[in-house]
Amino acid sequence: MAGQGIKGSLKERGIRLTRQRQILLDLIDVSGRHLDADSLYELARKKDGKLNRVTVYRTLKMLKESGLVDELDLMHLGGDQHYYETRLKQEHAHVICLRCGRVEEFFGEPLQRLRRQIESHFGFNILIARTEVGGYCAHCQTLRAREHSELVEREPSPAGGEHIKRKGRSPHHQTRQEHRS
């Protein structure tokens, strides 16, 4: 269930928590994923067949404007799609694999330390911080290394065909013994 914090915040703002809004909040809060509007709509329809797409978009807009939900682009891996999460979570960074799209959340003191350093250095009062880090997860690093190895083994020959390269040696590299022959 969406936390009491969100329900209380809606009440403070004079916004009624309808059954459909509750469904959407619960999905955003407990899905364990960052959902885009279409995914949210599909999941919500399974809980309430009367819920329509317009309700999803209006509710997301209202929750964003109320400061209860963050809209994320997650390094635009999904093109122009935006993803949603409740803002009442502890501040965190999104660590995104640029190959498979996996998103992890990083919580911890290093983020708080960075926040304090920025505030101190710039005399800045940070109200919200979003941190996204892009790279390759361990699995995708292994796949990339394997692909790179396969590419290195198959280099184009000067005649335009392919030849298999001996591992660990360039086709232009000669040992001393080969050079002398």
Image (tube, helix red, strand yellow):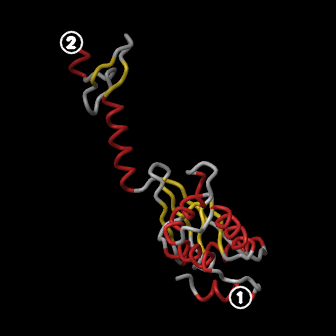
Residue in the foreground of this view, choosing between 26 and 70 = 26
Where is residue 4? Give x, y as percent: 60, 89
Based on the displayed image, in which of its 4 quarters is residue 168 positioned? top left
The image shows residue 29, relative to residue 132, as above or below, that is below
Q: What is the secondary structure assignment of the residue under circle 1?
A: helix
Q: Mark 1 Cα within 10 Å, few/some/many (few <14, many 20+)?
A: few
The three-letter code of the residue at mark 1 reads Lys
**Residue 146 horizontal side relative to residue 18, left or right:** left
* Alpha carbon separation for disc pair 2 and 1: 88 Å
Is there a contact, CB below 8 Å, between mark 2 and mark 1? no
Residue in the foreground of this view, choosing between 116 and 136 = 136
Image quadrant holding the C terminus, namely top left
Identify the residue position indicated by label 2 in the image: 181
**Which residue is found at the position 49% from the left and 67% from the top?**
46
Based on the displayed image, in which of its 4 quarters is residue 158 positioned? top left
Where is residue 74? Give x, y as percent: 58, 58
Total marks shown come to: 2
Where is residue 20? Give x, y as percent: 61, 75
Q: Mark 2 Cα within 10 Å, few/some/many (few <14, many 20+)?
A: few
Residue in the foreground of this view, choosing between 156 and 87 = 87
The image shows residue 94, relative to residue 7, as above or below, that is above
Identify the residue position indicated by label 1 in the image: 11
Where is residue 72? Give x, y as percent: 63, 62
Q: Earlier in the sequence, mark 2 or mark 1?
A: 1
Question: What numbered label is drawn on residue 69?
Answer: none
The three-letter code of the residue at mark 2 reads Ser
The residue lying furthest to the right in this view is 123
Q: What is the secondary structure assignment of the residue under circle 2?
A: loop
